[in-house]
Amino acid sequence: MGAEEKDLRDFKLQPMKCELNFLSKSDGSAILSQGDTVALVSVNGPLDIKSTSQSIEKSTLEILFCSKGGKPSVADRYKENVIRQTCEKAVLGCLYPRTGITITIQELEDFGGFLSCALNCACLALLNSGVSLRHVFACVTCGVDEKGEVVLGGRGCDTQISCVFDSIDKTLITCFSEGTYSEGTYLEAVARCRAASELVFAFYRDVVSKYSNAI
Amino acid sequence: MAEIYKLIHPVKYFNDYISRDIRPDGRKFHEQRNIKVNVNSLKTAEASAVVKCGNTTVVCGVQLELATPKAEEPELGFLVTNVELTPLCSSKYRPGPPSDNAQVQSYMLSDIFSNSKCIDLKDLCIVPDKLAWVVYCDIVCLDNDGSLVDACIIALMASLKTLSLPTVTYDPETEEIKVDPDVRTPLKVDGCPVATSFAVYKLTERNILLTDPSAYEEEMCGGLGAHFTVCLNKGLICGNHKFGGSHLLMENQEEVLKIAKERANLVVKVIDSCIKNEKSIDK
């Protein structure tokens, strides 16, 4: 994995480390660290859920976000929404009608860019659980420094733009941002994130090939 | 006949319209609904606004309160925004504690607002570490017919632009507070963030962007609320939220930014002319 880590450094992405099947009792789980930020995700399902939240067309995704402090807040609901909408696009829900898939995210360490780490970790946990997916997705965060230049990773920048891409066409699935920035900066950030997403996908491939011999 | 067709083949009905380059309500893809703004409609609030974008109706009321600033940030006042989605506005909402969707909308609004930095919280501080204003902006949705965040931001900005703060004198020795509601200073508002929502629909080969989607369109494009919201303040992007919907291509984004810019100019004009009219009536 040495070469890949060097690639990550060239792109100024945080070094990523991952372990699959971290939890023994869930259907799929992953722990991912991007630099100092660490997220733990467990996936359970498809399971039986109460009939009011069942959908006859597709499986219902339930996202639980647990922050480190354990106190629920409105910001957590927003993060849950970002993760739900992103995973809903990726999971082939029509294969499991009337069921529920629960994704639980536990924040372990947050040194910036947690949501981006949680999204990548959720993707790895979904891969590990064996739920059918349309595509995998990768989230990359860009920062804008004082000079108005786009830097990948971008920890500590006031302005941050995060983009999630799918693995097939590399089109934009989800995007969220903090701070203010110009149009040109935005378009550049999306392009830079798209380029860097290749590395995240390569990392996924490495992780999965380590754990499974069949693929 | 069309109504029955819509019920039996909802997807095909929608598709038929879109493939003929028109939306079911007769609008073109990038046509927006009419915006109506009325300021100072609630006399019990310090400042207020009612906004209608098509059928989407929101009311914003601003209340003022005095409080001690936080110890960590002794020079900052408070501005609290809250969006309430009552069962009145759509059959999707039930009475009781705010739903997940309401919390998400509320968070998005306060996030866009704080990112735009159009209000300097230092202006709300009266005496550092002792006294500051708390501005409560409560937004109630009366009718949710899509593009909710757009309407909420317009209502919020229109009411904040008309807000004026009473003069407060604070005696540091006796800690006595005197409020003079007759002498008021208007609140400084820097720019005016304007949000523009889009729904993204995938029509076999190409992606269609629907500007200012109605609730029906949002639902047909598969998602809770609009998929893509861009917020501009003085030409700078201060919020960019895209979830769900079809995936976006690069050329879509340039298109989006162009439309958002045009709309931002339009909305600022609407708000300003509304406030001007209101002032001339008062005189």
Image (cartoon, coloured by chain):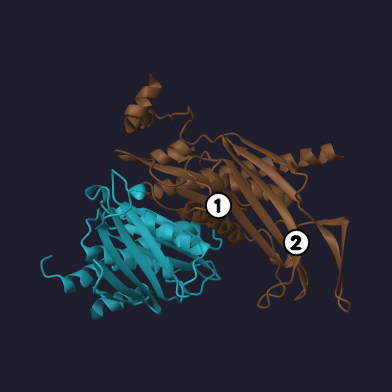
Chain colours: A cyan, B brown
Q: Identity of the amino acid at label 2?
A: Glu
The residue lying toward the viewer, choosing from A65 and B202, is A65
**Position of A187 compared to B184: left or right?**
left
The residue lying toward the viewer, choosing from B260 and B219, is B219
Q: Which residue is mark 1?
A: B231
Q: Which residue is mark 2?
A: B65
Give the x, y percent position of residue A121. Answer: 32, 68
Q: Say which quadrant the N terminus of chain A sits in.
A: bottom left
Identify the residue shown where x is 32% and y is 30%: B12
Give the x, y percent position of residue A17. Answer: 30, 77
| Crowd band around label 1 with a 10 angstrom C-alpha radius: few (<14), some (14–19), many (20+) | many
Q: CA distance from mark 1 to mark 2?
A: 29 Å
Chain ID, mark 1: B
Q: Is residue A50 above or below residue A121?
A: above
Q: Quadrant of residue A28?
A: bottom left
Give the x, y percent position of residue B171. Answer: 88, 74
Helix, strand or loop at label 1? It is strand
Q: Nearer the viewer, mark 1 or mark 2?
A: 2
